Amino acid sequence: MISESTVRKWYTPVEVSTLQRWLLVSFVVNIVLLAVDLLRGSQSNAMLGVLGAVVIGALLTSLPEEANPSRRNTALVLGGVLLLIGLIRLLSSPVTGFDLWMQGWLVGPGALTLLWVSSRPVSAWSTRRMSLEAIEFGLARNQRREHRFRSVGAHLVLLHFVALTLLPLVWILDIALSPGNALGGNLGGPYTGEHFSNMLGSDAFWTWMRNSLIVSIGTTLMGLAVAIPAGYAFSRYKFKGREVSMFAFLLVQMFPGIIILVPYFLVMKTFGLLNSHLGLILAYCVTALPLCVWMLKGFFDTVPRELEEAALLDGCTQFQVFTKVVLPLSLPAVAVTALFSFLAAWNEFLLALTFNTSNDMYTLPVGLASMISSTGQAWGDFAAASLLVSLPVALLFLFFQRFLIEGLSAGGVKG
Amino acid sequence: MVSVKFTSVSKRYEDGFEAVKGLDLEVKDGEFLVLLGPSGCGKSTTLRMLAGLEEVTEGEIRIDDVVVNHLPAGARGLGMVFQSYALYPHMSVRENLTFGLRMVKGKDRLSDTEMETRVKETAIMLELDDHLGKKAKELSGGQRQRVALGRALIRRPKVLLMDEPLSNLDAELRHQMRHEIRRLHDELGTTTIYVTHDQIEAMTLADRVAILDRGVLQQHAPPLEAYREPANDFVQSFLCRHLDDLVETANTLLRPKVDAKEEV
């Protein structure tokens, strides 16, 4: 049987327990943010920041408890002080989005403390001994509210991650849409599409696009043509040197690209493949193949052998077993592999820069880089072009999303 | 007249392990033979050599007096039911059934209407006619088992091979399918070779059992004969003692009830 004292011990208004968690987070954040004040060299703000952190620390140790009015009053006073510090800092700092966010870490906790500690459920609980019925009621209320508070907290955290990923994109979009070629952009100012029409109207851009498409699609097709049979052989057949060659495949991956750059260049030069599409396609295949082969091998491993045996008994040749049974089952993995080689080729910069030095053989990344030279920095055009470059990839991802999920959770096939 | 004959067949793997040693075995036309033995006794290897999934190291396997040692699996005219069913997951039940028929090229290929008739026959025989459009994963275990059987039977195989086909089913279904398999055999008269480690399955299904241990044939006889006159100690303990134990357990379970009745 649960005694009354147990129930009493387990009841804390959800506001207080939530405050405890959130104050702890803001304590840590404020300490980290002190670094910003120090970097900016504003000593007074730094002092206030230290004070704010100390107040939060004090608040953490003096949160209200049952039937203890003096502790509640202390918490209220400390909350007020916190709010005050935050407001002073807010007034003495420049008005930018970042500063608003930064001071929010003091103003927010201060205001929330005042609001919640003075709310009726917390007041009642912290000033007098409650009746058992009131506690039971409070427990039920806790359960309802806790879920909501947690989801607010989780969303706050996640919003920070979203902002972190979106900010660079927003910045680029801003530069691309602002008139002129400044790196800063003009957030919220008058926008223009001139950079986009500049790029879409320029022959160079379409030449680069054509080169990139030829090279990326070529890499994908050639890579798959080699990786699919290789992955299947590694997965199904035992042959001499199997382990060694699988390791050798990975060996190339272990060197930084820059090391093989010079030998590559000499090879390409010898075969007359500089300034050609084929040269790049071959080079990209070599770099993309190991991962593709390993990925496909991993998927083929999950296709049950009995399926192939059943197909053999159904009169298939070894090749038909592969094309009619194994390959259709492995489409998700093949799609992921294709996407991977396409992306690798689409984004590659170093090899393309080294091998294809003539203007009309530039791929998109190299072409983009050539826009930012010592003679002129067309940041606006550059930003517009980089958005145009990412567009096909983003579309590809949208299209392949279903396969990606299936392919990455390989082994979902069950006889 | 379809018969299968093993003449001193041996299987040695690359690592030197000898799975089957000098097996001599004859399966008569229309016979239901059960290969029985503990795991690792070579019964599955024997079946797989006949199916063409494993190479024969020594000896000869004949189907209808033709040596099939070097014939590809698909050319031997066999149907096989696998333990895991091995249905093609990306195909519907209908496509699973007809896959083997569609692989036939040249003059032996059935016309589309003939194929459809076969599908109907098989589906009705195995109570699958409502499920022909479904994918394998939408079927229950018992239905998958039927599709696997149907896929093997639809090609009118000379010999039907089954490799522990019931071991993935629950006890109730296993019991039901066991009767169905025997009924199908009595109806169609297909020469059948059935691999199992389950003594009850062997006793209830077989015309004759071939009991194997460590790659060597221990006894080849009708089930009751093997039970009454075990050829050696292994058969005695693996078959006879096991069955006696089962009977005894059943008796002890039932005895109290019998006693209670007598008292009343």
Image (cartoon, coloured by chain):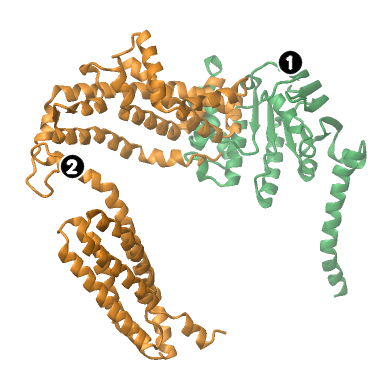
Question: Which residue is label 2 attached to?
Answer: A173
Q: Which chain has been coloured green in this picture?
A: B
Chain A: colour as depicted: orange
Residue A345, above or below B150: above
Q: Element type at marker 1?
A: strand
Question: Which residue is label 1 attached to?
Answer: B67
Residue at figure coordinates x 29%, y 47% from the top left: A165
Residue at figure coordinates x 73%, y 15% from the top left: B66
User: Where residue B217 sits in the image (x, y, percent)?
Assistant: 85, 30
Q: Nearer the viewer, residue B94 or B42?
A: B42
Quadrant including the C terminus of chain A: top right
Residue at figure coordinates x 20%, y 66% from the top left: A89
Residue B128, above or below A322: below
Left or right: A145, with B20 as reference point: left
Q: CA distance from mark 1 to mark 2?
A: 75 Å
Q: Element type at marker 2?
A: helix
